[in-house]
């Protein structure tokens, strides 16, 4: 199991970032959540059994989707696998 916590900054709130991320997640074997933070960033916590699947999901967000135009900075950290999480949700 591979899990990551990612913080996106830029124009990532008020542009449908969370809903688009959830929609993209439906096409991948990932679980997790995405939420807005009070400081204007978006936090993504995501995991997958397959590191390549997780990387493909992130590439879709960061390089191939309309969301890429809104991301100015990304901060990524490996985290322990998420417990009690099923599916992908907006927190």
Image (tube, helix red, strand yellow):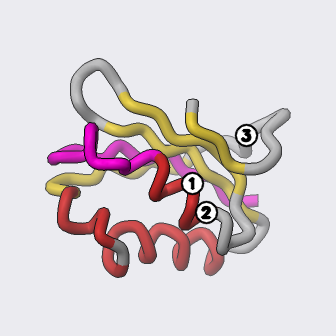
- Is disc 2 in contact with disc 1, using a CB cutoff of under 8 Å? yes
At 23% from the left and 30% from the top, the residue drawn is 40
User: Would you name the residue on which mark 2 appears?
Assistant: 25
Give the secondary structure at mark 3. loop
Q: 83 or 32: which is nearer to us?
A: 32
Image quarter for residue 41? Answer: top left
Q: Residue 56 carries which label?
A: none
Residue 16 position within the rendered picture, expressed as x and y whole percent measured from the top left: 36, 48
Check the image and report above or below for 9 versus 67: above
User: Would you name the residue on which mark 1 appears?
Assistant: 22
Residue stretch rendered in magenta on the structure: 1-18
User: Would you name the residue on which mark 3 appears?
Assistant: 82
Residue 83 position within the rendered picture, expressed as x and y whole percent measured from the top left: 80, 35
At 62% from the left and 80% from the top, the residue drawn is 52
Check the image and report above or below for 5 versus 56: above
- For the N terminus, the image quarter is bottom right
Give the residue at the far top of this rendering: 38
């Amino acid at each position: 199991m591979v899990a990551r916590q990612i913080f996106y900054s830029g124009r990532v709130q008020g542009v449908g970032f969370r809903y688009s991320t959830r929609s993209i997640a439906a096409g991948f074997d990932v679980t997790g959540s995405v939420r807005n933070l009070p400081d204007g960033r978006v936090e993504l916590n995501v995991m997958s059994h397959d590191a390549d699947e997780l990387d493909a999901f992130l590439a879709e967000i960061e390089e191939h989707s309309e969301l890429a135009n809104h991301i100015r900075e990304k901060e990524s950290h490996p985290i322990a696998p998420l417990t009690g999480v099923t599916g992908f949700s907006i927190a």
